[in-house]
Amino acid sequence: MVAVRDTAISQLRRGVLEFCVLALLLDTERYGFELVRALADADGLVTTEGTLYPLLGRLRREGVVETTWRESPSGPPRRYYRLTPAGRAALGAFVVEWTRFRATVDALLETGAPR
Amino acid sequence: MSTDTLHPLAAEYLNRLRRAGRGLPRGRLKELIAEIEGHLSEAISPESSDAEALTVLDRLGEPEEIIEAEQPQAVAPRDRRGTHEWAAIVLLLFGGFFFGFGWLVGVILLWSSRAWTTSDKWIGTLIIPGGLATLLIALLPLGSSETCTGGPPGAPERCTGGPSTGHDILSIVIIAILVLAPIFTAVYLARRAE
């Protein structure tokens, strides 16, 4: 039963992760390391930081984020990520769905019956 | 950016990532390596202690996990040292004793495995063709070149055409190379396919 719960939570986490990336980019652009550390520091969201880089690559290929290389004050150039209009739209749609989903689940968990 | 400016543990991690990602399309792997290399140089300085470096690497996760997240079917481990690879290594070493045929099968298995890079495969093929069996072929002329004739009673036997001291050293060196080189290659291939 514990294993089933772990799987469910990790699937849930995987499902929302890309929207958390988009949310972090809503007002500002960020470079990979900065994004990854921000996500990793959020409690319970990410277990291995390295697996976020493939996700960033996929979001770029899907056109929801775009990237620019910039020189870094120290070390190698940094790849900066920012939202595209498609990304902004995807995030907006997710926020609506998530708010409804969260309210429904919370209500079920708290009262044992749907609102 | 050169890996010279990375902490040694970070450089080793990147090499593991490169090896694990051999199944990925070249462009994707290059992009991923650049990102992870950037992460490592941000998080670990060349002067960091090993403990600090290991903490960062632990947070990053195993290279295989990262490759699997990039493209689940591209993970190299599934094609690592299995029966196929062991068969290739054993046949490259001993297959020559079966009329050379076994060695050829070893070469085919070597080139058909995705556990090795192209340069590994060339090393496996060229050092040394025929494997240990080549030693036998090399030893044949040495054994047959000496002819001895009996002298008068009491006199020592006289031999001609036998190897001189210079030849002896050369022969020992050649034999050592023919024995050791295929063994080193087998060990190298086994380690590279880990």
Image: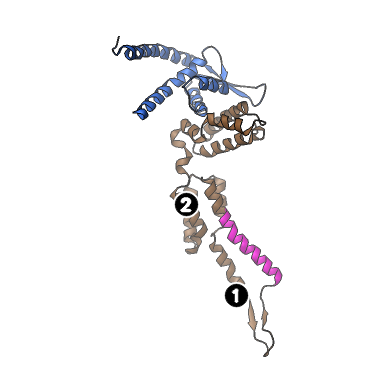
Q: Chain of mark 1?
A: B
User: Which three-letter amino acid code belongs to the residue tagged 1?
Assistant: Ser
Query: For the point 43% across and 36% down, which residue is it?
Result: B73
In percent of width and height, residue B66 lies at 50, 32
In percent of width and height, residue A28 lies at 55, 13
3D distance between C-alphas at marks 1 and 2: 36 Å
The residue range painted magenta reads B164-184
In percent of width and height, residue B168 lies at 67, 69
Q: Quadrant of residue B138?
A: bottom right
Report the mark closest to the observer, 1 or 2: 2
Query: For the point 45% across and 14% down, which residue is it?
Result: A91
Identify whether B176 is placed above or below A110: below
Residue B168 shown in magenta = yes
Colour that chain B carries in the picture: brown
Colour that chain A carries in the picture: blue
Image quarter where the C terminus of chain A lies is top left
Callout 2: helix, strand or loop? helix
In percent of width and height, residue A96 lies at 40, 11
Instruction: Using a 10 Å C-alpha cutoff, classify the residue at mark 2 as few (fewer than 14 neighbours), some (14 to 19) or many (20 or more).
Output: some
Q: Chain of mark 2?
A: B
Q: Residue furthest bottom?
A: B153
- According to the picture, the residue beneath numbered tag 1 turns out to be B144
Q: Residue furthest top?
A: A115
Image quarter where the N terminus of chain A lies is top left
- According to the picture, the residue beneath numbered tag 2 turns out to be B86
Residue B119 shown in magenta = no
Q: Nearer the viewer, residue B24 or A7?
A: A7
Q: Main secondary structure of the magenta part?
A: helix
